[in-house]
Image (tube, rainbow, N blue to C red):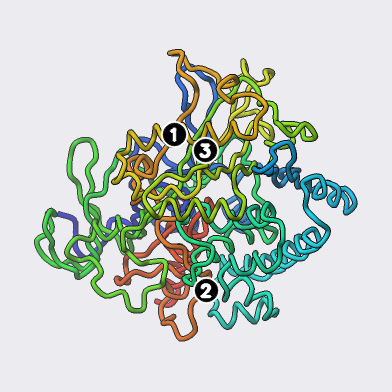
Amino acid sequence: MPDEKTPDYDAVIVGAGHNGLTAAAYLAKAGRSVLVLERDDHVGGAAVSAQAFEGVDARLSRYAYLVSLLPQRIIDDLGLDISLVRRRYSSYTPDPLDPTRGLLVDRAADAEGARADFARAGVGPEDVAAWDELYDEQRRIAEALFPTLTEPLPTRAEAKARLGEDEVWDAFIERPLGDTIDARFRSDLVRGVVATDGLIGTFTSLDDPALDANRCFLYHVIGGGTGDWDVPVGGMGAVSGEIARAASVAGATVLTEAEVLSVTPAGAGAFAGTATDAATDVATVQYRHGGEDRTVTARTILSNVAPAVLERLLGDAGPSDTSGVADGAAAVRPEGAQAKVNLFLTRLPRLRDETVAPEAAFAGTFHINELGVQLRAAFERAEAGELPDPMPCEIYCHTLSDRTILGESLRDTPAQTLTLFGLHVPDRLVDRIGNDELRDRIRTAVLASLNSVLAEPIEDVLAVDAAGAPCIEVKTTRDLEEALAMPGGNIFHGPLSWPWAEDGAELDTPAQRWGVATRFPDVLLCGSGAVRGGAVSGIGGHNAAMAVLEADAAG
């Protein structure tokens, strides 16, 4: 049994996703001894690249796929060699009522060209002006709030004052997102384009006064202080791999195939299923590695797993009272709400809209069947226990921006990858329909949705794998839970929180000030479940490390 007075490590981190690795790199650079325990045989969590199709030499960003929220501060602090490509085209949205026309948003277009693009999609000048005003407001929100994500939590009043525009604050923070969108735009096509940023991975109505859509929208539009979503060169695995390199160079130890079995805070005592038979003066982690159960102690434990998973690991020591704990630390089992589909094509398909080249349409975010009215109908249908019909989809093509994820034999061919998110596919449908059946239905729905705007069936351009099967991979929320230990397949680890503390909230400890607190002072959140967690950002890991270092400095 380890010495109960002297911990084995300053910090033990549960989970080697990109956030856990970020925390490890920061702490190790500051001279702390760090052990990272990862149940899988590789690091990166959801931020990995993988060969999804047998015999196809392409490494897809299988789960996460674009980068927006990763701060330049973290890249600079850790000396990360990461290349991100800015996409020229923001989005393309065919009109579901007339797929021979659509809205192409081209960043390179001048004002006259942009008006012409909108006009070709049947969007009037009033909506063009409202669009410009909206995105100018989003830019100002991003410039005001993004820098705070790597600082101690501001209060709500401080965040509002930092923006300094009460009308803009009210429009996006206080009122349901649907109200703001409907009031500003006449075109339902444009309403849908704007609304989707509030719905990816979030099962909610745009009109819900709980404002879940508003929080999702906010994180989607503030990244980097610009709201841009960039392509990681080499795939998402290149990002997490570079953070892992930084952690290793700094001196952190990363142990894969090490499944954590339990977490015991200092002084918490014993609970069922552990070898601990008395309260200890240091935090304890039990894990299984190489077929053996092992125990390690630490001054602080950082959790990169979802709060609901942490609660299970805490067992009888788990939180029964979360007063003073930030919103993001709630440990209720969450529900994800998306389908994830990867495809590999021999070439891009032709569009029914002949005015837009496929290379432009697929280079940004390709929206399908996402009129405002369609998004509302899809939510209502899913809430009633049925798969949306038609399926609202968002697609992006990594290989139009970065061919390095393809093997040399494919780089000079027309072959392309597609990554697709299906909206409003909540985890509850798995229980109602069955996972295998739901996966088949999603596949059918996605192909039908795609084909509704194409001039040729997508099946005609699907590549085949080594066994002759079409290259299409469907992941349900339950598949994500099984692969990544994300409860309910929730890609954010739980409900998103505002990136500030409510006025009057307890901010007495470093962990509370940085938005990473749990009930236990020596157990911190460092993943997407922290306040300001979610997406491939490293922010949860950065903030947990800052809380540890601040506590150390205070003695």
In percent of width and height, residue 223 lies at: 63, 58
In the picture, the disc for residue 237 is: 3
- Nearer the observer: mark 3 or 2; the answer is 2
Tell me the quarter of the picture where residue 323 sits. bottom left
- Indicate whether 207 appears above or below 125: below
Residue 36 seen by the camera? no
Q: Residue furthest front?
A: 97
- Which circle's residue, 3 or 2, is located before the other in the chain? 3
Dot 1: few (<14), some (14–19), or many (≥20) neighbours within 10 Å? some
The residue wearing badge 2 is 500
Residue visible at 80% across and 58% down in the picture? 128
Q: Residue furthest left?
A: 277
Q: CA distance from mark 3 to mark 1?
A: 20 Å
In percent of width and height, residue 304 lies at: 38, 54
Amino acid type assigned to the residue bearing label 2 in the image? Trp
Identify the secondary structure beneath mark 3.
Answer: helix
- Which circle's residue, 2 or 1, is located before the other in the chain? 1
The residue wearing badge 1 is 474
In percent of width and height, residue 192 lies at: 63, 54
Amino acid type assigned to the residue bearing label 3 in the image? Gly
Residue visible at 21% across and 68% down in the picture? 281
Pick the residue in front: 151 or 546: 151
Identify the secondary structure beneath mark 1.
Answer: strand
- Nearer the observer: mark 3 or 1; the answer is 1
Residue 237 seen by the camera? yes
Contact (Cβ within 8 Å) of mark 3 with mark 2: no
Identify the secondary structure beneath mark 2.
Answer: loop
Quadrant that contains the N terminus: bottom left
